[in-house]
Image: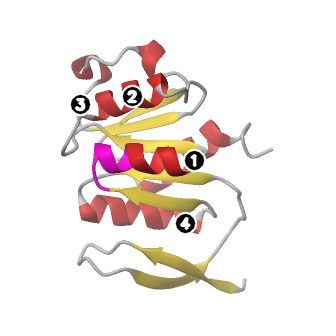
Amino acid sequence: MPTETLPPVPSAIGAPQRVTEPVRTQRSTRILLVEDEPLTAEVFARALLRDGHVVDVARDGLQALRRLREQTPSLVVLDMSLPTMSGADVVRDLRAAGHVDLPVLVVSGSERRQSQLTAAELWPGAWLLKPVKPKDLVLLVRDLVKDRDR
């Protein structure tokens, strides 16, 4: 299988790094990954990149909303515990801004009912409890964007 140079991924050390890895599939989905923990962001971004997605990383809720104004992704992967504003507030703001059909995959250490985020606010989307295996994240992302890839 040929290898391809992937775009820089935010490193846990802080400097972007180029990674040469086999790319299994080519997808046209753009994922906005909102995660403030550098190592988690790096692991998730690498898994999504390997699966052929374009990944944009935001480190807090305000940065995520700015990125959403610049370009609408195919899906948002969102941590609930973020600096500057909660993940629940990010979901409410993006829905209020008209992104009502944008799938949101919440990856959190707590249950949805603890977030005060309703199932209707999250829809379309899903909730994954941490710890999350990267392969499980990738499979759920594929499922959530399968209709948007066509």
* Residue depicted at x 74% and y 46%: 149
Measured Cα–Cα span from mark 4 to mark 1: 14 Å
Residue 118, percent across and down?
37, 14
Q: Badge 3 is on which residue?
A: 110
Q: Which one is in front in this view, the residue at disc 4 or the one at disc 1?
A: 1
Question: The residue under label 1 is which amino acid type?
Answer: Pro
Q: Which one is in front in this view, the residue at disc 2 or the one at disc 1?
A: 2
Q: Badge 1 is on which residue?
A: 73
Which mark is first along the chain, 4 or 2? 4
Q: Are discs 2 and 1 less than 8 Å apart at CB?
A: no
Measured Cα–Cα span from mark 3 to mark 2: 21 Å
Q: Badge 2 is on which residue?
A: 93
Query: Front-most of 23 and 98?
Result: 98
- Magenta extent: 59-64
Q: Badge 4 is on which residue?
A: 49
Residue 77 in view here: yes
Residue 11, percent across and down?
32, 75
Is residue 62 highlighted in magenta? yes
Residue density around tag 3, few if under 14, some if 14–19, many if 20 or more, within 10 Å: some
Question: The residue under label 2 is which amino acid type?
Answer: Asp
